[in-house]
Amino acid sequence: MAKEGKRIRAAREGIDPTKLYGLSEAISMVKAKANAKFDETVEISMNLGVDPRHADQMVRGVCNLPNGSGRTVRVAVFARGAKADDAKAAGADIVGAEDLLEIVQGGKIEFDRCIATPDMMPLVGRLGKVLGPRGLMPNPKVGTVTMDVKGAVGAAKGGAVEFRVEKAGIVHAGIGKVSFDEQKLIENIKAFADAVAKAKPAGAKGTYIQRIAVTSTMGPGVKVEPSTVLTA
């Protein structure tokens, strides 16, 4: 087992790994323990009672964080004509069709979110092996395949966070920066948890949201009492 460094031991001081903290206290601890030289991202992890190997237990969706994510999101849009113009007007970083296809096929992926109009999906589908593993493939379930490219670009730039359960049944996402006010982080976390709760699949049995923890990029994890996060 790897030996813990002094920084890690110091960061964990005062945090009981067996205790479930209230959300407000947990956020205060995360902010206090974030001592990196950059504005760390505050992250949430949720252990769900699902087995994503079964199609009826897949969890996927999108959440519009009320206070934004604090990230600068680069958006690419596959569109033509008037919709391409709408995307550019909305602030998309890259807009194109066959030309954008060639750029991506060449290995140049300089964007964090990919949006496409429905008519472009036969073209975008050829990029499945490139975009899929990176979680960038447009999908109507999360609003990235749409005719409303203006709204989709605006949502992505404004702090929309996509989520998808991993093989181990865990959903995680960045929900803000440690520089955010505590109340803004709490509002973002509750909004994200609510979105995950509403995405509960038909095949989920037993307790759906089992464990919740919050952390910062370089900080220790703090376990959270789920009842202080989830709305009634």
Image: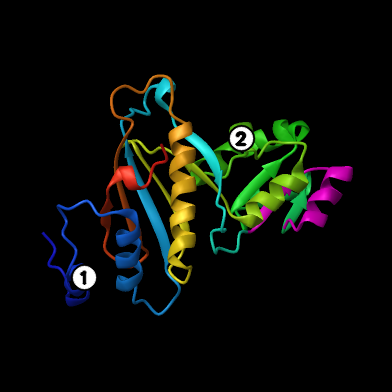
Q: Position of residue 51 (x, y in %)?
A: 33, 27
Along the viewing direction, whichever of 78 and 168 lies nearer the viewer: 168
Q: Residues within 10 Å of mark 1 (few under 14, many from 20)?
A: few
How far across and down, in percent of the image, does residue 18 sit? 14, 52
Residue lying at 70% horizontally and 52% vertically, measured from the top left: 154
Indicate left or right for 157 with 99 as reference: left
Q: Quadrant of the C terminus?
A: top left
Q: Position of residue 19 (x, y in %)?
A: 17, 53
The vertical placement of 149 against 13, above or below, is above
Q: Position of residue 29 (x, y in %)?
A: 29, 66
Give me the residue at 26% from left, 57% from top. 222
Circle 1 — which element?
helix
To which residue does mark 2 refer? 139
The residue depicted at 32 percent of the width and 72 percent of the height is 32
For marks 2 and 1, give the CA distance: 39 Å
Mark 2 residue element: loop
Left or right position of 72 against 134: right
- The reply, left or right, for residue 67 in relation to residue 52 is right
Q: Say what amino acid the circle numbered 1 marks.
A: Ile
Which residue is under mark 1?
Answer: 8
Q: Residue pushed farthest right?
A: 82
| Residue 43 within the segment the image draws in magenta | no
Residue 32 appears in the picture as rendered: yes
Of the image marks 2 and 1, the number of the one nearer the N terminus: 1
Question: What residue appears at the point 55 percent right and 41 percent down from the top-left corner?
Answer: 62
Question: Where's the N terminus, which quadrant?
Answer: bottom left
Magenta region: 74-92
Tag on residue 175? none
